[in-house]
């Protein structure tokens, strides 16, 4: 069955970036001249997905506004002859068909709740793409397109993006435990933020192709959270149950994964994107070469 829709979770509070994210959602922080969430949408569009559901929270109307037409701004740009900027602004609203749904407070805390919020916008029985709102991937073939190609070829229940990370970093992510001797790689389970020896150094990143069944599993788990049997509604819990029921594949992506979940890694992503930019990359590289990066240059 073809994959037509995608859900992007943009309902977080961005607490690691406060006070900057008090009024501006973290997903609207810029990567050069585009906000993070627009980079995600572009990846989906480049992968053939044009039906996009944005799951937001109260106070993040600006995310929906970004993908809407802004008449006053367009008139201002037209009247001042800034047609290049006008075309850029107009193109954003035409990228895809957007639905915006607010994640209600009745839903449990956790990264599985955005899917329950988006349930009524998804079609029963159809697979869909799910993206976390703070993971970027630089690659020749868009990351989502890679997943779609694998999913279409092997027809598993779900296909999840992974990338190898150093052993010292795997404790920050979900680590894949693979079934022995399977190719493509089949997941036995995912260990969330392993505290001891990790089952592998394949770290889960925020790209998934999921079946409708995951909604049903999350709905049951949400009841357990509300009854106090679980702490949060982690997507990993639902994925591990799906792994027990069906075949779930781990796809090691081709490309560079850049997370923007904290200030340090956000700045790293900005630098990588800036160095790759055709207009400013060369000059920015020259600027970086002039910096004094010794210990005495650190300012707190």
Image (cartoon, grey):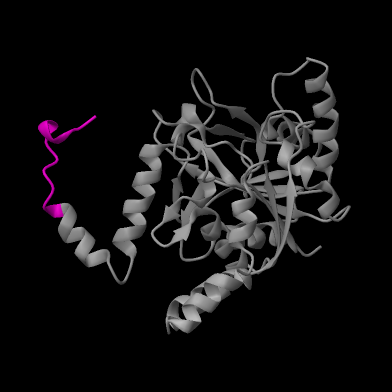
Q: Percent from the top left, x then y, of residue 42?
A: 56, 64
- Residue at horizontal 33 percent and vertical 63 percent from the top: 276
Relative to residue 140, is residue 251 depicted above or below?
Answer: above
Relative to residue 70, is residue 219 depicted above or below?
Answer: above
Q: What number of labels is visible?
A: 0
Screen quadrant of the C terminus: top left
Residue lying farthest to the right in this orientation: 124
- Residue at horizontal 40 percent and vertical 44 percent from the top: 266
Give the residues in magenta. Answer: 289-300
Q: Percent from the top left, x then y, of residue 35?
A: 49, 56
The answer to which of 75 and 159 lies nearer the viewer is 75
Magenta stretch, main secondary structure, is loop
In the image, is residue 243 part of the stretch drawn in magenta? no
- Residue at horizontal 80 percent and vertical 28 percent from the top: 222
Q: Percent from the top left, x then y, of residue 71?
A: 60, 72
Residue 153 seen in this snapshot = yes
Residue 254 seen in this snapshot = no
Q: Is residue 238 left or right of residue 273?
A: right
Q: Kindly indicate the quadrant of the structure image that contains residue 174.
A: top right
Q: Percent from the top left, x then y, of residue 47?
A: 61, 66
The answer to which of 116 and 88 lies nearer the viewer is 88
- Residue at horizontal 72 percent and vertical 41 percent from the top: 114
Q: Is residue 156 left or right of residue 263?
A: right
Screen quadrant of the N terminus: bottom right
């Amino acid at each position: 069955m073809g994959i037509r829709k995608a859900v992007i979770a943009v309902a977080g509070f961005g607490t690691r970036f406060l006070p900057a994210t008090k009024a501006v959602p973290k997903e609207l922080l810029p990567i050069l001249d585009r906000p993070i969430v627009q980079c995600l949408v572009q990846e989906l569009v480049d992968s053939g997905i044009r039906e996009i559901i944005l799951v937001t929270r109260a106070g993040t109307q600006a995310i929906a506004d970004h993908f809407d037409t802004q008449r006053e701004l367009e008139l201002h740009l037209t009247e001042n002859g800034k047609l290049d900027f006008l075309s850029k602004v107009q193109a954003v609203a035409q990228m895809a068909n957007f639905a915006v749904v607010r994640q209600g407070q009745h839903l449990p805390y956790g990264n599985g709740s955005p899917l329950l919020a988006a349930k009524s916008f998804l079609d029963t029985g159809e697979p869909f793409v799910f993206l976390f709102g703070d993971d970027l991937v630089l690659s020749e073939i868009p990351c989502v397109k890679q997943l779609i190609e694998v999913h279409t070829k092997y027809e598993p229940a779900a296909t999840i993006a992974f990338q190898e990370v150093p052993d010292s970093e795997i404790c920050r992510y979900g680590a894949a435990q693979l079934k022995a001797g399977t190719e493509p790689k089949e997941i036995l389970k995912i260990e969330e933020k392993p505290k001891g020896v990790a089952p592998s150094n394949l770290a889960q990143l925020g790209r998934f192709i999921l079946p409708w069944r995951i909604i049903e599993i999350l709905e049951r788990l949400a009841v357990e959270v509300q009854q106090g049997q679980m702490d949060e509604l982690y997507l990993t819990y639902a994925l591990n149950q799906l792994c027990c029921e069906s075949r779930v594949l781990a796809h090691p992506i081709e490309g560079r994964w850049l997370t923007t979940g904290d200030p340090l890694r956000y700045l790293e992503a900005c630098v990588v994107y800036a160095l790759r930019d055709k207009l400013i990359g060369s000059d920015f590289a020259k600027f970086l070469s002039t910096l004094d990066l010794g210990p005495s240059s650190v300012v707190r």
